[in-house]
Image: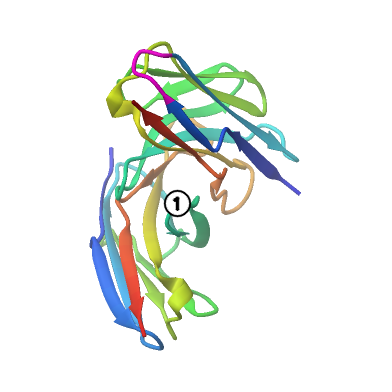
Amino acid sequence: SQTIHQWPATLVQPVGSPLSLECTVEGTSNPNLYWYRQAAGRGLQLLFYSVGIGQISSEVPQNLSASRPQDRQFILSSKKLLLSDSGFYLCAWSDPGARVSEAFFGQGTRLTVV
Amino acid sequence: GQNIDQPTEMTATEGAIVQINCTYQTSGFNGLFWYQQHAGEAPTFLSYNVLDGLEEKGRFSSFLSRSKGYSYLLLKELQMKDSASYLCAVRDRRKADSWGKLQFGAGTQVVVTP
């Protein structure tokens, strides 16, 4: 069966510090991968979307970046965090070859920038 | 792009029925999803509609009208554990991608009271 791992679960970082969140998927190949951010009491904002290794679509201009160095690895990074980067970050995957191709989410990382 | 609108909050009594409406505008429709999200947790997939009509899955049903850009999620026999945020998400069809990306609405907070 397929699983998605996302870590860390919680993170407190000072303003101006770097960020690296990692997400890996097991049990599938060539997944579509997503990074979403959810501010408190708000919906999910799509940040990055990837259909293959090295292929990243950025949905929102910001100081975050994403990379996909391996087929089932998706990394969210920042060189210098801002206070506004605080939020709940969710990684997700979907199978582009499946009939429904719903997104399956990791457990999320709650980031607080102080 | 897409605009996805759903009510912010709904309150209903245990055992009752609640209908959550979602309207959307998209340049290329490729499916509508409903997700449930409990506070502090990741969203979980509930239902999928790509053709017009009603899809029933236990106590949950979802309806789609593509011509009207409209969907609803119907929750029957409400239980206390159904208190959660319900997210409507639309997948668009993009020429550059194999399957398209998911965009989410802000979510509807359902409060079930005894």
Q: Chain of mark 1?
A: B
Q: Which residues are magenta?
A: A13-17
Instruction: Please determine whether, in this image, residue B32 is positioned above or below residue A61.
Output: below
Q: Secondary structure at mark 1?
A: loop
Majority SS type along the magenta span: loop
Q: Residue at x 66, y 31 (%)?
A: A30
Instruction: Please determine whether, in this image, residue B20 is positioned above or below residue A84.
Output: below
Res. A30 in view: yes
Instruction: Please determine whether, in this image, residue B110 is positioned above or below residue A56.
Output: below
Instruction: Please determine whether, in this image, residue A108 is positioned above or below residue B7.
Output: above
Where in the figure is residue B86, as x and y percent of width and height?
38, 61
Res. B71 in view: no
Left or right: where does residue A71 sit relative to residue B92?
right
Say whether residue A15 is magenta: yes
Q: Residue at x 71, y 34 (%)?
A: A29
Q: Residue at x 28, y 67 (%)?
A: B21
